[in-house]
Image: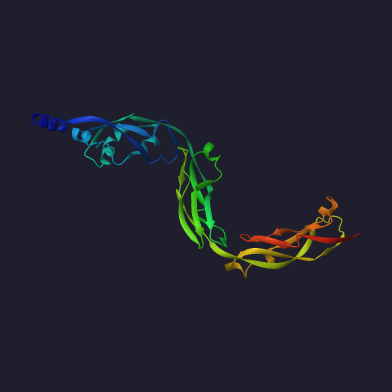
Amino acid sequence: MAIGAWLFLALNNKYVYTAKTVLVYKNFPQKRAFHALQSDTVDLQVEGTGWQLLFARLRIKPQSISISLEKLNNRNYILFSEQLFQVNRQLETSQNIISVRPDTLYFDFSERTVKRVPVRLVSNFTFGRQFDVSSDIEIIPEYVTLSGPEEELTKIKEWPTDTLTLKNMQNTTGARVAMAQNKLKNVNIFPTSAEIKVPVDEFTEKTVELPLTVVGNKEYYSIKLYPKKVKVTFLVALSKYQQINENFMDAVVDLAEWKNLNHSQLRVKLLRFPDHCKLVRISPEKVDFIIEK
């Protein structure tokens, strides 16, 4: 009983422990880009009872604390001692933070500039049989706003998303995807996510007949082609089957193949072809020709 009474009294006493936590910055300076010169993890000197130590209740909740950077508008360091009251109000326990190590956070500064760059979707899509993307993928917003040192922003031409993985798609699908993690501590990005809409449709074959045009005829020869037209077979979304026709394509042959390469036949090429359609075949792929000088 004596030992139990002693232990009970000992555990009721106050002790100072050390607990680690992560810093989250808020109230950023509006006209200054900053870069922290130390780790974002600090040691909290926490006052608590022996009971808390015995039952491993030293874990600080939440696992991060918010620190205001408002003072950085006038100086290049932050003092924890000035924000200790606000830090203690964030805790969900009866523990009391009496100090932080280090007490001073130092920052490196440069002039802050703003830049807009396009969002690049990183994707991993698979589709059901005969299904595919039928039109441009919508990304909202199309651009993100970056703020930071000019020398850093000039290196950034676009901002990728996290990989969006969608499997066996057979219908138009929407999703929200986060922007790729920002590894530059002195560059801020807004917004941090985007809405993605992937239009998906079933595809089917369609064949159109196209007249051939001769290019590369610098000497203005009189040329006869055999045949004069070719058949182009391609895959098109069912929703656009009636809309897509021969007016969306141009088929040509290049006379330079005969003049420079001595080819006896000319290969058919498509100069224009509709987006999100897939070429299956051109028949014939090569044509005969006669040149009249």
Look at 46% across and 47% down and name the residue there: 190
Left or right of 119? Residue 92 is: left
Q: Quadrant of residue 97?
A: top left
Question: Residue 276: percent from the left, percent from the top?
Answer: 61, 60
Left or right of 93? Residue 261 is: right
Question: Residue 13: percent from the left, percent from the top?
Answer: 16, 31
Screen quadrant of the N terminus: top left
Residue lying at the far right in this picture: please name it. 293
Left or right of 260? Residue 180 is: left
Left or right of 48? Residue 283 is: right
Q: Nearer the viewer, residue 285 or 161?
A: 285
The image shows a total of numbered marks equal to 0
Colour scheme employed for the rendering of this structure: rainbow
Question: Residue 104: percent from the left, percent from the top?
Answer: 35, 29
Q: Nearer the viewer, residue 222 or 31?
A: 222
Residue lying at the far left in this picture: please name it. 1
Question: Residue 244: percent from the left, percent from the top?
Answer: 64, 67
Residue lying at the far bottom in this picture: please name it. 242
Look at 80% across and 60% down and name the residue there: 214
Q: Quadrant of residue 212?
A: bottom right
Screen quadrant of the C terminus: bottom right
